[in-house]
Amino acid sequence: MNLKPIGEKIILKKIKPEEKTVGGIVLPQSAKEAPQYAQVVAIGPDVLANEDTKDQVSIGDKVVYAKYSGTDIKIDEEEYIITKLEDLLAVVEQA
């Protein structure tokens, strides 16, 4: 199933938290904090059509999003968030 965002919406794929700490300790599900970063998988047409916003985020970017933003959905065992561009806080760039 493919998701196609409408208007100014962006679809993010949640990034799963690490199962182990750096020291090798396995974390139980209850001890894991849900990450607030995800990967952009689709961008709505209104974001791409706007000259001010079209270059702010691209498909494949890893982003940080606001904690209580968007709508969570699950499709084919993958977790996604449908949110607005304004709910994205930063693009994560690898150094």
Image (tube, rainbow, N blue to C red):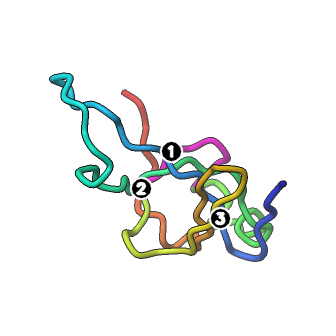
Considering depth in this image, is 58 or 68 the residue closer to the camera? 68
Task: Rate crowding at label 2 as few (under 14), some (14 to 19) or many (20 or more) other CA atoms within 10 Å.
Answer: some
Task: Please report the bounds of the magenta region as a residue range.
Answer: 57-64
- Quadrant for the C terminus, please: top left
Of helix, strand and loop, which mostly describes the magenta segment?
A: loop
Write the residue at 70% across / 57% down: 75
- Quarter of the view holding residue 49: bottom right
Residue on which the image places disc 1: 62
Q: Is the Cβ of the residue at disc 1 closer than 8 Å to that at disc 3?
A: no
Q: Secondary structure at mark 1?
A: strand
- Quarter of the view holding residue 79: bottom right
Task: Rate crowding at label 3 as few (under 14), some (14 to 19) or many (20 or more) other CA atoms within 10 Å.
Answer: many
Write the residue at 62% across / 66% down: 73
Q: Is the Cβ of the residue at disc 1 closer than 8 Å to that at disc 2?
A: no
* Outermost top residue: 24
Q: Is the Cβ of the residue at disc 3 closer than 8 Å to that at disc 2?
A: no
Task: Rate crowding at label 1 as few (under 14), some (14 to 19) or many (20 or more) other CA atoms within 10 Å.
Answer: many
Residue 66 appears at what percent x and percent y?
Answer: 40, 69
Residue 88 appears at what percent x and percent y?
Answer: 48, 64
Q: CA distance from mark 3 to mark 2?
A: 13 Å
> Which amino acid type is shown beneath numbered disc 3?
Ile
Residue on which the image places disc 2: 64
- Relative height, residue 94 to residue 65 (above, below): above
Residue on which the image places disc 3: 10
- 61 part of magenta stretch: yes
Residue 52 appears at what percent x and percent y?
Answer: 63, 67
> Which amino acid type is shown beneath numbered disc 2?
Val
Write the residue at 45% across / 44% down: 16
- 63 part of magenta stretch: yes
Residue 17 is left or right of residue 14, and the answer is: left
Residue 89 is left or right of residue 57, and the answer is: left
